[in-house]
Image (tube, grey):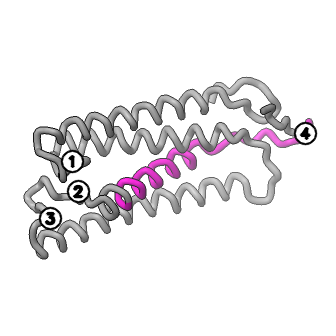
Amino acid sequence: MAAIAPPPHAPRVPFPAAAGVLFGIGLGGFFDGIVLHQLLQWHHMLTSAGYPADSVRNLQVNTLADGLFHSVTYVCVAVALVLLWRRAHGRHLWWSSRLLAGTMLVGFGGFNLVEGLVNHQWLGLHHVNETVPRDQWVWWDIGFLLWGAAMAAAGAWLWRSAPPPGGERATR
C-alpha cells in the first residue's frame, strides 16, 4: 500500500514524538492494569511485596496501589493528548502514521521493560503471573520483558523509517 504524499505546500511541522511515547506508556500501563491486574487477576501492584491477595485488607491495599498506578498512566495519556493537540491545533498536518505507531510502540514497550525490570525483578513488588507455581514466575517475567523489547524495537524501526513532511527520510 503506497503512502499518501503530502501536498507541496504542507507545513513542515515535526511530529511530537514525546506525545507518542507518552501515549504508549499510558496504554501499556492501562493494558497491564486492566488485563493482568483486573481481568486475569494474575497480580496486583504489591502482591509480592508483603500484600498477597489472600485477605480483604491486602486486596484493599493492592486496590489503592493499583489505583495510584492507573492515575499515573492516565496522566501520561492526558499529557500526550495536550502535546499532540498543541502541535496540531489549527493546522492541516501530514504526519506519517508510522510516527504515531512507532512512538506509541516505543512507549508501550519501554513501559514493559521499565515496569518489568523495576517492579518484577529489582523491587519484587509483583510478578506477571502469580497464579502459576512460583518456580514458573520467572518465565512469565522474561516473556513480558521480551514482549516489551520486541515492541520497543519494532516501534523504533517504524519511527526511524517514517518519512517526514515533504518526503525526506526521517532522522528524528
| Mark seen at residue 53 | 3
Element at label 1: loop
Q: In percent of the image, x 12 and y 69: which residue is there?
A: 58
Residue 86 image point, x, y percent: 67, 57
Figure label count: 4
Residue 168 image point, x, y percent: 77, 25
Residue bearing the label numbered 2: 43
Q: Do the residues labelled 2 and 1 touch (CB within 8 Å)?
A: yes
Crowdedness near tag 1: few (<14), some (14–19) or many (≥20) residues, C-alpha within 10 Å: many
Element at label 2: loop
Crowdedness near tag 4: few (<14), some (14–19) or many (≥20) residues, C-alpha within 10 Å: few
Q: Seen in the image, is 96 located left or right of residue 47?
A: right
Disc 1 residue type (three-letter):
His
Q: Label 1, label 4: how many angstroms apart (C-alpha)?
A: 50 Å
Q: Seen in the image, is 153 located left or right of residue 17?
A: left
The stretch of residues the image draws in magenta is 7-34
Q: Label 2, label 4: how many angstroms apart (C-alpha)?
A: 50 Å
Residue bearing the label numbered 1: 127
Disc 4 residue type (three-letter):
Pro
Give the main secondary structure of the magenta stretch.
Answer: helix
Q: Picture quarter containing residue 14?
A: top right
Q: Which is more N-terminal, label 1 or label 3?
A: 3
Q: Are marks 4 and 3 in contact (CB under 8 Å)?
A: no
| Mark seen at residue 7 | 4
Disc 3 residue type (three-letter):
Ala
Q: Label 3, label 1: how many angstroms apart (C-alpha)?
A: 13 Å
Q: Seen in the image, is 87 located left or right of residue 151?
A: right
